[in-house]
Image: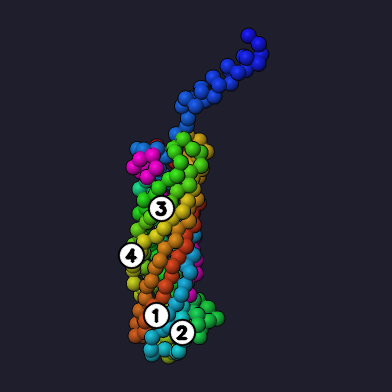
């Protein structure tokens, strides 16, 4: 057999063997997924105006926060997964805006947004890198709202300290992400989530402030499948 003929027979045989050889599987039907990482929530605020009695043009702004996040998921089939995001409360700072811009921090609020996602993964479970799209539902629960001395001076000068509450809300969110497999069990996950969220602040001095928060969240996690 000549070397050229030998190569002509050997190369197709090697290609066929590679195609039929078992490949590493990741995120396949029946797998449980556990992810631990950090999540940063950044509000994109469009504030309404404080209702009377108040100085005209008072608005609000909300700062970002980063906290650890735990995700538990289950692969319904090779491409579709159900996942739950859990974590500790985020602490967001409330700032004055509009006619009181520059007054600084006027309050804080803890926010707990547990979220359930349905993710659709592109490509098959044998691929090392898999982008995905997601649709989620979240209940955004506000708690421990605290006003500062600046808030009291702005809302009720000379009166008792001002307190406020924020309405908790249901919201739908969209996700775009990618997972990258490091080994048979370990992978990294990067996810961007966009939500629509409107709420209102209610002050004990009688005013209300409608505010659209519309947060963006980005998380980076290390995952394990079992």
Mark 1 or mark 3, whichever is nearer to me:
3
Q: Earlier in the sequence, mark 3 or mark 4?
A: 3
Could you tell me if residue 161 is visible in this image? no
**What residue is at 35 percent from the left and 40 percent from the top?**
77
Which quarter of the rendering shows the N terminus? top right
Could you tell me if residue 4 is visible in this image? yes
Mark 3–mark 4 distance (CA, rounded to whole Å)? 17 Å
For label 3, the residue is 134
42 vs 109, nearest the viewer: 42
**What residue is at 46 percent from the left and 75 percent from the top?**
46
For label 4, the residue is 170
Mark 3 or mark 2, whichever is nearer to me:
3
Q: Is residue 67 magenta?
A: yes
For label 1, the residue is 209
Q: Is residue 176 magenta?
A: no
Mark 3 or mark 4, whichever is nearer to me:
3
| Element at label 1 | strand
Report how many numbered discs are placed on residues in the image: 4
Q: Earlier in the sequence, mark 4 or mark 1?
A: 4
Q: Name the residue at the top extreme.
A: 1
Q: Which residues are magenta?
A: 61-80
Residue 124, relative to residue 11: is it above or below? below
For label 2, the residue is 58
Q: Earlier in the sequence, mark 2 or mark 4?
A: 2
Mark 1–mark 3 distance (CA, rounded to whole Å)? 32 Å
């Amino acid at each position: 057999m000549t070397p050229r003929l030998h190569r002509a027979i050997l190369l197709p045989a090697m290609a066929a063997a590679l195609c039929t050889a078992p490949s590493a599987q990741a995120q396949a039907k029946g797998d449980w997924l556990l992810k631990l990482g950090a999540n940063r929530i950044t509000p994109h605020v469009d504030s309404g105006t404080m209702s009377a009695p108040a100085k005209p043009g008072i608005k609000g702004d909300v700062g970002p926060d980063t906290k650890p996040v735990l995700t538990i998921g289950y692969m319904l089939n090779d491409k579709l997964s159900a996942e739950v995001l859990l974590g500790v409360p985020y602490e967001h700072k409330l700032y004055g805006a509009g006619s009181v811009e520059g007054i600084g921090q006027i309050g804080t609020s803890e926010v707990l947004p547990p979220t359930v996602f349905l993710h659709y993964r592109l490509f098959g479970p044998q691929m090392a890198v898999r982008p995905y799209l997601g649709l989620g539902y979240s209940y955004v629960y506000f708690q421990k709202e605290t006003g500062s001395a600046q808030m009291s001076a702005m809302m009720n000068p000379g009166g008792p300290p001002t307190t406020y509450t924020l309405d908790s809300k249901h919201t739908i969110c969209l996700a775009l992400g990618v997972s990258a497999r490091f080994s048979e069990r370990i992978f990294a996950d990067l996810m961007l989530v966009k939500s629509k969220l409107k709420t209102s602040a209610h002050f004990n001095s009688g005013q209300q402030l409608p505010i659209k928060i519309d947060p963006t969240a980005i998380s980076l996690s290390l995952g394990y499948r079992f």
